[in-house]
Amino acid sequence: MYMEFFVEPNIIKNMKKITKIAVTLLLICFSIHVKGQELAVIKSSNITIDELPEYVIITSQNTKLLGGINIIIDKKKSTYRDELEKLESLLQDGDKLRIRNQTDLLNAMSKLGYAYVNAYNANAIMPSNRNDDAEDILNIVDGGEGAYKVNMVFRKKEKYRD
C-alpha cells in the first residue's frame, strides 16, 4: 500500500508568506520594546532637556576598581544645580544608563539631546581621593601618582536650544 501526499503549491507559498510576516512582526515588537525601555529610563530620571543648561562639562576618571568610570559634573553655585545633580545621578547609576566608559558617555549624552563639542585634561594628574579605599588601591597600583581626569564638553543639539 502506497499513499501519496500531495500539497498544493499555493499552500506552501502562503505558509512562507505567513512565516515572513510573523518574523517581521516579532522583530518590530522587539524593537519597540527595546526603544520603550530606553525611553522609560530617560523618563524615569525626571530630567527634561528643556530644564538643562545649553552647555554641560562632564569630568570622567577611569578609577573604578571593577571597571567603569567616575562621572563628576561641577554644579557648585550653579543655577542648574538640581538638574545637574539629576543628570549626574542618571549617568552614574548602574541600573539606568550603565555608563562604563567614555564611549558609553558620548552615546548616552547624544540620546539625551547633547552633541559632543570638545575634550581636555582636567589638571594633568589628580591626587587620590583619600575618602575612597578603592581609589587608594588603584592609586598605589598606578604608582602613587593619581589618575588622569578628562573634561568633556557637550552642547544641546540645535533642535533643543532656546
Image (cartoon, rainbow, N blue to C red):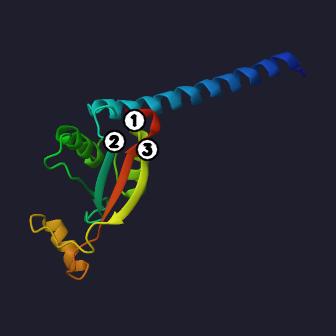
Name the amino acid, label 2.
Glu
Q: Are marks 1 and 2 in contact (CB under 8 Å)?
A: yes
Q: Are marks 1 and 3 in contact (CB under 8 Å)?
A: no
Tag of residue 133? none
Q: Quadrant of residue 134?
A: bottom left
Label 2 environment density (alpha carbons within 10 Å; few <14, some 14–19, many ≥20): some
Q: Going from the N terminus, do you reach mark 1 or mark 3 first?
A: 3
* Front one among 18 and 27: 27
Name the amino acid, label 3.
Ser
Q: Position of residue 151 (x, y in %)?
A: 31, 60
Q: The C terminus appears in which quarter of the rendering?
A: top left
* Front one among 143 and 34: 143
Q: Going from the N terminus, do you reach mark 2 or mark 3 first?
A: 2
Label 3 environment density (alpha carbons within 10 Å; few <14, some 14–19, many ≥20): some
Q: Position of residue 104 (x, y in %)?
A: 40, 52
Cα–Cα gap, marks 1 and 3 = 14 Å
Residue receiving disc 2:
54
Q: Quadrant of residue 45?
A: top left
Q: Residue at x 43, y 44 (%)?
A: 110
Q: Secondary structure at mark 2?
A: loop
**Left or right: where 7 falls relative to 47:** right
Residue receiving disc 1:
161
* Front one among 8 and 30: 30
Q: Quadrant of residue 71?
A: bottom left
Label 1 environment density (alpha carbons within 10 Å; few <14, some 14–19, many ≥20): few
Q: Position of residue 95 (x, y in %)?
A: 29, 42
Tag of residue 110? 3
